[in-house]
Every structure is written in structure tokens, then in C-alpha cells.
Image (spheres, rainbow, N blue to C red):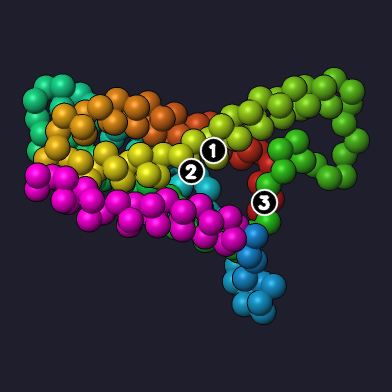
Amino acid sequence: MKEQSLEKKYNKLIVAVSIIIPVAVAILFGVKLKDFGIIVEPLSFLPPIYATTNGITAILLIAAVVAIKNGNRKIHSILMTSAITLSLAFLVMYVAYHMTSDSAVFGDLNHNRILEDTEKTSIGSLRIVYLLILVTHIILSIAIIPMVLITYVRALAQNFEMHKKIARITFPIWLYVAITGVVVYLMISPYYVY
């Protein structure tokens, strides 16, 4: 019953964090520090760093699954805690970048050049793929927040049976979010304005 009381203790916090994070990110995404008279250089060095953070998170998630399948609970716990920490670091860098920089627009490679029809078609087709990946990435990155927190709390409560049940759902979604974070970066990176 200890595990149920620990889970119950964290339920309200999980709900609050799961709402506050996406709302705060959405609000801060639209806030530009320059609009408030705060002049800072764009943090244009951050996108490759936070994309790398996503990539490392994906590797940690896979390594954590391998560790637990091999019966190494301690390594699994360390890797999962590290993945959560990297996800939080990603979030901070992502918000900081968008508060100091204009968002890149897919297909906006050169403002001054007239594109050939074949280039327009190619960019248009890739833009559809990019947007599909981006939209699923964003939606699932919001959905994964409570799932990760619930999974983590169940492990802390040593409710391993319930932990395993939700982890089977949490893992592939979180892995998808981490990998598509890298893919989105690679697809949009040619359009960053430095």
C-alpha cells in the first residue's frame, strides 16, 4: 500500500506539471525578449546542441531497456534519470532559443532567389513530410510528459508490475519523440538564419 500512497501523493503534481509545461512552452515560444527591450544575441548555437541532446536521449532510452532486460535495475534507473534530465535540458534550450531567435521556416532557403518549378515541387513535397513529422512530434511530446512522470513515480514506489505496463507504452512514444526531434532539426537546419 506504500506504493499506492506514493503514487497518490504525486498524482496532482503530475497533472499540474503535464499542463503547466506545454502551456508555458507555448506562451514562451511566442515571447521574444527583444519585444520587451531586452537586447540579447540570438542563441543560434543551441539547435544543434538540443538536437544532439534528443539523440543522446534516444540512445539512453535504448540502453536503459537493454539494461533492464539484462536484469540491471541500477543501471536502468541511472539511464532513465539521465534521459529525463536531458529532456529537461532540451526544453530549457528550446525555449531559450525561441525567445531570442526568429523561427526558421521550412523551404525558405534564399529570400532573394527565384526558385525553379522543380525546386518548388521538391520543397513542397518535403514540406508536407516535414510538417507531418513535426506535428506528430509536438503532439506526442505533450502526451509523453504525464506518461514519463507516471512511469517514473511507479518505479520510485517500487510498483514494478504497473511500472512495466505503462513503460511498454511510454518507451516507444518517448523514443519516437527523441528521434523525430533529431529528424526535425536535420530537416529544418538548412533554413536557419544566422
Residue at 75% over, 22% down: 125
**Residue 78 has which mark?**
none
Residue 3 horizontal/vertical position (percent): 13, 45
In depth, the one of 131 and 4 nearer the eye is 4
Residue at the disc numbered 2 = 142
**Residue 103 has which mark?**
3
Q: Is residue 177 left or right of residue 58?
A: right
Nearer-N-terminus badge (3/2): 3
Is residue 9 located in the magenta-colored stretch of the structure? Answer: yes
Distance, label 2 to label 1, CA atoms, is 5 Å
Label the magenta part by its dominant secondary structure: helix
The three-letter amino acid code for the residue at tag 3 is Ser
- Label 1 vs label 3, nearer the camera: 1
Residue at 9% over, 30% down: 72
The three-letter amino acid code for the residue at tag 1 is Ile
**For the magenta stretch, what is the residue range?**
1-29
Q: Is residue 156 above or below residue 39?
A: above
Q: Are marks 2 and 1 in contact (CB under 8 Å)?
A: yes
Residue most toward the front?
A: 1
Disc 3 packing (10 Å; few <14; some 14–19; many ≥20):
some
Residue at the disc numbered 1 = 139
Residue 30 lies in quadrant? bottom right
